Image (spheres, rainbow, N blue to C red):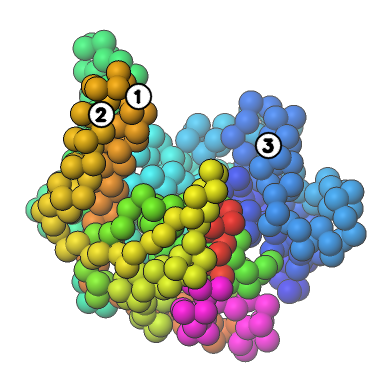
Amino acid sequence: MEFFLGKTILITGATGFLAKVLLEKILRTQPNIKKIFLLIRAKDSESARQRFNNEVLEIELFRVVKEKVGGSLSLSALAEEKVFPVPGDISSGDELGIVNSHLKDQVLREVDIIINSAATTTFDERYDVAMSINTFGAFNVLKFAKKCSKVKMLVHVSTAYVCGQGSGILPERPLYLGETLNGNSYLDIEVEKKVIEEQLKELEAQKATEKEVRLAMKDLGIQRAKLHGWPNTYSFTKAMAEMLLLASKESLHLIILRPTIITSTYKEPFPGWIEGARTIDIFVLMYGKGKANFVMGDPNTILDAIPGDMVVNSILAALVHHANHEYSAPQELIYHVGSSFTNPLKANDIQKLFFRYFTDNPWSSKSGEIVKVRKPVFLTSMKGLRTYIAIHYLPILKVLKLLNMILFNYFEEKCMTVEKNINLVIRLAELYKPYLFFYGSFDDTNTERLRRATTKMNLSETLYFDPNCIKWEDYFMKTHIPGVVKYSF
């Protein structure tokens, strides 16, 4: 792609899943790129380089590019030439926490494009932490971009779920300052900032422990999100980021990508790579390991999944396309990257595939015990979940506690494990409830226009991101679930 010839890119959130897939794709397919600056949380340049080597370059994701360039030494040499880790933090002000003045000046002078993928994706993150990274961190990236002498485009990776618990066809529309999803209140981001400050002061006056502060700030985030119509802290703080960016972008070309549930790679650099348990994969872990034999949700709910490499390709396609097409209307700068509109996948279909996979490929524990799974049960309410727990979990816990008393705490660890599993299941059910009872599909008119543009530029093979090509049964049975088992179990 000629567009990347001689270009310099700054990527934030560089040690995250999506940024790693993006970096790999660029290194493997764009040899003419000039530089890639990676913003990494670290105390100095040496620590940033060490994190980059350990957490990025040495992972299996880079196996293909390593083979392409001729081994580990050649990959290291390529990285030394093209990739420059920058110690910093988007939550540390509009200079992104870059304290090395020489390095900061170099970035400000040389960068052509900024891709902001930094975020905390925990649904119930501490409100102060989520605001500092997801909302004000994104705003800091925008302010930094305005200081750069050459930057013309900023790509901000958001989430499709800024829509909250919408239903029907959800348009690629912008979010504006002050608007809420329930219409019952006015959203003032400065007020939200003061609410956080006051709560922290109050907790400090009460001499609250670190744990008490953490729990209080988590609760505050959920409360404030629900007050304005969002289901959780993550989607709420990401929505506020979009509002700030659109209100303040001025002449900067801002592109907002809204991926849905990001899953393992579909094709590149190889199928099935994933890092950590992401959303639906938490159930894969619990079910495959025999920790839970049920899923809460509506069997007809559409779970909108999209492979990570397709999200990365949509980012690159947007950059190439918008380099030659200036759009001023905000709604033309927003892209839903998902599958629900054109290739929907129901929760019931996924549940059947999980059952088939782990029946044919049962998990073996460390002790060699084979985990036999049963067909998962769908529970359609929190009441149903608590009833299920009362029937299937509590009797086991009562017996263990009784034996524990008789045998002098011999089963103490098992008791704690069962109690921990019960609490985890309830917590996860509450957090994921909005997505397991979701009745919307994401309109992708802009994204389809982008796909057509890549076809005209003869880039549809290089930058594939059409979910219609995914055969969900093959993808889950042969790619995604095996990938989760390999990389996350």
Residue at (70, 54) in percent of width and height: 60
Which of 211/88 is in front?
211
Residue at (34, 33) in percent of width and height: 414
The residue type indicated by label 1 comes to Tyr
Residue 229 appears left or right of 76 = left
Q: Nearer the viewer, mark 2 or mark 3?
A: 2
Q: Earlier in the sequence, mark 2 or mark 1?
A: 2
Please tell me whether residue 464 belongs to the stretch shown in magenta. yes
How many callouts does the rendering have?
Answer: 3
The residue type indicated by label 2 comes to Leu
Residue annotated with mark 1: 410
Question: Where residue 143 sits: x, y (%)?
Answer: 50, 44
Residue 189 appears left or right of 445 = left
Residue annotated with mark 3: 51
Residue 368 appears left or right of 187 = right
Q: Is residue 133 above or below residue 489?
A: above
Residue annotated with mark 2: 403
Question: Where residue 125 sits: x, y (%)?
Answer: 35, 39
Please tell me whether residue 12 belongs to the stretch shown in magenta. no
Q: Secondary structure at mark 3?
A: helix
Q: Secondary structure at mark 2?
A: helix
Q: Earlier in the sequence, mark 2 or mark 3?
A: 3
Q: Between marks 2 and 1, how big is the CA–CA gap?
A: 8 Å
Question: Where residue 183 sits: x, y (%)?
Answer: 12, 57
Q: In the rendered structure, which segment of residues is drawn in magenta?
A: 455-478
Q: Are marks 2 and 1 in contact (CB under 8 Å)?
A: yes
The residue type indicated by label 3 comes to Arg
Q: Residues within 10 Å of mark 3 (few under 14, many from 20)?
A: some
Q: Between marks 3 and 1, how big is the CA–CA gap?
A: 42 Å
Q: Earlier in the sequence, mark 3 or mark 1?
A: 3
